[in-house]
Amino acid sequence: MSDDAEDGHDTDPDTDDAEEGLTYADAGVDIDASEAATAALVSAVGDAGADGSDYAGLLDIGDRYLALATDGVGTKLLVAEALSDYSTVGIDCIAMNANDLVAAGVDPVAFVDYLAVDEPDETFSRQVGAGLRTGAERAGVELVGGETAVMPEVVRGFDLAGTCAGLAAKGAVFDGRAEPGDALVGWASSGVHSNGLTLAREAVTRDHEYGDPCPFDGYDTVGEALLEPTRIYADLLGPMREHGVRGAAHVTGGGWTNLERLGEHRYEVTDPWPARPVFEFVRREGDIADEEMHRTFNMGTGFVAALDPAAAESLAAETDGRVIGTVAEGDGVAIRGLEL
């Protein structure tokens, strides 16, 4: 595969073919409508007396913050169901929550899960539990409980979600705002993670079954590539604090536009991690424009931090990161010739 294909940008997003390609909204997820609905919910709930970041709710408990994040696995569960392989979705469930706490500068400490099923099954539950255990080990959290609900008239198949609790001294929480002149350090993703699967599934199942042989190395089947569990970034928290990180972004729903959570600046990404082959496969099968890919998926980089450039190379060297760009005056995200 060529370098351009590996980076997921071998198609000009301005071509007619790209404009006619599959979009996330076509697949059934309208990001703008989702954000509007979320804003309506938040407005109706009102101020409950807690502080917050863009990634977690923070409750002042004296000299520390108690933080909470909640999320689920999403339609990645449908791939697991199609392959009857539920061994990794528990990792995803913990990852999506723990990584949000890390982005806020909070240490994940405890996790509770919620598993809803249409009918109980011991083998299935055992596989989900094994994934939760592995995820908890990787995130350094304790599994302190959970709930299994059997709701045949409400749930078809199953759903898995959870809540992660974290603690942090007030001085340890990230400010959450980058400054012009900051460097951006990024860390590689493990694959698609647990966002954008509605678009990815729609794309690859146009001409493939999940059980079909995978057309690139590393996986036996197409479904196995999509099930690659989300990387957990909890091990980065200590080094990020030591190097004075101002804010971090967990690259999830919305793709690279997540960087805009760090403030209204221009984010110039000049050296992102290469996109793994699964992204080029999804793009090609769905004839998806590059811009849509970068607005939906992590495209190879799953976590980004903004900090003083004098400390950036050291942080990257001490972890498995790399300096991927800079923060400048302006707005938007520039990456791989795209303006997001």
Image (cartoon, rainbow, N blue to C red):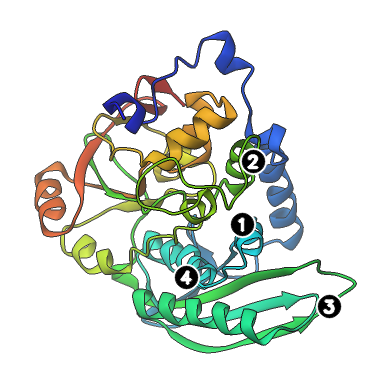
Q: Is residue 36 above or below residue 78?
A: above
Q: Amino acid at mark 2?
A: Thr
Give the Cα separation between the discs numbered 1 and 2.
11 Å
**Residue marked by disc 2:** 205
Residue bearing the label numbered 3: 151
Residue farthest to the right, as pictured = 153
Above or below: residue 194 compared with residue 98: above
The nearer-to-camera label among 3 and 1 is 1
Residue 81 percent coordinates (x, y): 66, 64
Q: Amino acid at mark 3?
A: Met
For marks 2 and 4, the one nearer the N-term is 4
Residue position marked by numbered label 4 in the rendering: 91
Residue 45 position in % (x across, y down) = 73, 62
Q: Considering the numbered disc 1 on the image, is that residue within a helix, a strand or a loop?
A: helix
Name the residue beneath numbered marker 1: 79
Disc number lying in front (1 or 4): 1
- Secondary structure, mark 4, is helix
Q: Residues within 10 Å of mark 2 (few under 14, many from 20)?
A: some
Q: Earlier in the sequence, mark 3 or mark 2?
A: 3
Q: Residues within 10 Å of mark 1 (few under 14, many from 20)?
A: many
Q: Earlier in the sequence, mark 3 or mark 1?
A: 1
Instruction: Measure how far apart labels 3 and 2 are at the Cα level.
Output: 29 Å
Residue visible at 17% across and 45% down in the picture: 308
